[in-house]
Amino acid sequence: MIPRVLIVHQHVGSDALVSDRDVLEQVAVVEQACRAAGWPVEVCETSLDFTRVDQLLTSGRFDVVFNLVESLAGSDQLAELFVRLVEARGVPITGSSARALQLSNDKIATKQLLREKQLPTAAWCTLDDAGNASAELRPPWIVKAIGQHASLGLDDSCVVLGPAADVAAAIRAQAARLGTPCFAEQFIDGREFNVSLLATEQGVEVLPIAEILFVDFPAGKPRIVGYDAKWSADSAEFTGTPRTFDFPASDGPLLALLEKLSREAWKSLQLSGYARIDFRVDQQAQPLLLEVNTNPCLSPDAGFAAAAAQSGRSLEEAIQQIVLAPLRRSERAAVVAPSQVVASETSASAMLIRTEVTHSDLKNVERIVRATGFFREAEIGVAVELVEERLAKGAASGYEFLFAEIDGAVVGYACYGPISVTEGSYDLYWIAVDPALQKMGVGRKLLARAEEEVRRAGGRRIYIETSGKAEYLPTQKFYERCGYQLEAVLKDFYLPGDDKLVLVRAIA
């Protein structure tokens, strides 16, 4: 297959910062890589008005979108909206999903998840909990924007050496200066490493690890890679922060640990395509994850290109891999049989759960529900209609979905939503697992995640309706093992002799 590529980037004004203009260089590099491979390619600029780009997405002329939308309306956090549009249209897109992009554009949410997954990250506090900062956060600290990348606004003034009581004032001052919410993070005055990752046919590859050196920094000058170090070519910070890929043998264990942590972060944050993860190493030689970049810069002088070159690839070859990755994911989702998944995974330990709904899920849901052998054609149609409703109306539909994926294949799903005119009551409308993956923990994980999401939304009770026919007894027992109790039996509800059972569980 020769992929037809649509490159999309944000509008860049004539007065844009150099960090914003950099995307145009990336566009040129990606376009050249596609043409070198003989792939048809077109470039489209977009803003928050997606009219033009949506016409292209629905034209059927493109097989994959290369996402270079780094911000919209001046906000990095709005960039995920474009990815959600592409996902809703069912077109494969490079890089990470909208969910992963949303997470990486919220440094607090990223750090919370890293801590949840027991991955090391520097201590932090926000303005809301700055009063308790002294319990965990000791000077020095560094004040950063919560939702901005490219080291925007990061300079020596962001490193604060005063007492912990000053943390709130420092956060307020930096937020006012940058015009965006900020937080304080423990400043780790140690070595800094960049780890680039690339999805290939063989799996996720960790490219050669780079260390950022701090050369000729005067005594007392904070050792940080600030805005000038990245973007001001004539500054002392720019020339004084070269990268190196050369390490003594004694660094072997540290490099191995950095690779291990990067792979765990890739999996925990559900990254895809390519990424860069930044670390600092503290005085106890413990690496701490600082930043996760889901779509790192692809300019020829950037860190990802340098790491690709160290791996023996040209930047063009790395970009071509990035283009092919979402196409491989799409193909696997379409053609991987559940039996093939079982052959490669003997448990649900490698399962990922996503919440985004795409057009390909229309077929996924129909396939899974039909494969169970339990449902009539009319019922299968209802299952698919709920997906259509969600795609058309979004959250306003009242239907939330969870999709279980193993190795790129959807192997189960759940659909739930609030019950109208109630306070905190939810229905679990559907939970179905491909027969080849049943009794392997997939259904239990989907149900647990649904309960977690309902609890987070303020839900109190979850109701489940199922058939009372003998063939549904294993389903009823499954729910009971998961803590649900039979609340009511409605005789002959579905058909003569086919009762409706209503089970319920209080979750709050």
Image: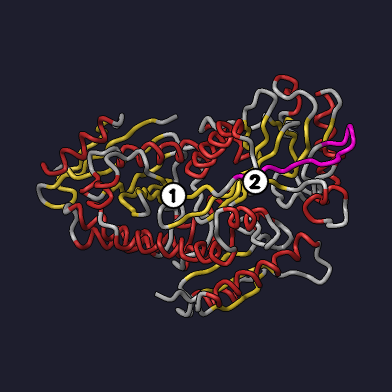
Q: Which of 326 and 495 is in front in this view?
A: 326
Q: Residue at point 75% right, 21% down? A: 134
Q: Is residue 382 in view from this perspective?
A: no
**Quadrant the C terminus occupies:** top left
**Quadrant the N terminus occupies:** bottom left
Left or right: residue 188 versus residue 91 is: right
Instruction: State the image coordinates of residue 39 (x, y, percent, origin top left).
Output: 50, 77
Tell me the CA gap for discs 1 and 2.
Answer: 36 Å
Name the quadrant containing residue 163. top right
Q: Residues within 10 Å of mark 2 (few under 14, many from 20)?
A: few
Please, what is the dominant secondary structure of the magenta stretch? loop
Name the quadrant containing residue 315. bottom right
- Identify the disc placed on residue 237: none
Q: Nearer the viewer, residue 436 or 379?
A: 436
- Is the C-beta separation of discs 1 and 2 under 8 Å? no
Instruction: State the image coordinates of residue 98 (x, y, percent, origin top left).
Output: 54, 55
Q: What range of the chain is rendered magenta?
A: 209-222
Disc 2 marks a residue whose amino acid type is Phe
Instruction: State the image coordinates of residue 167 (x, y, percent, origin top left).
Output: 81, 29
**Farthest residue toward the top?**
135
Nearer-N-terminus badge (1/2): 2
Disc 1 marks a residue whose amino acid type is Arg
Image height of 470 relative to 92, above or below:
above
- Identify the disc placed on residue 245: 2
- Which residue matches tag 1? 354
In terms of secondary structure, where does tag 1 sit? strand
Image height of 112 relative to 44, above or below:
above
> Does the magenta portion include 202?
no
Left or right: residue 136 versus residue 359 is: right
Q: Which of 184 and 341 is in front in this view?
A: 341
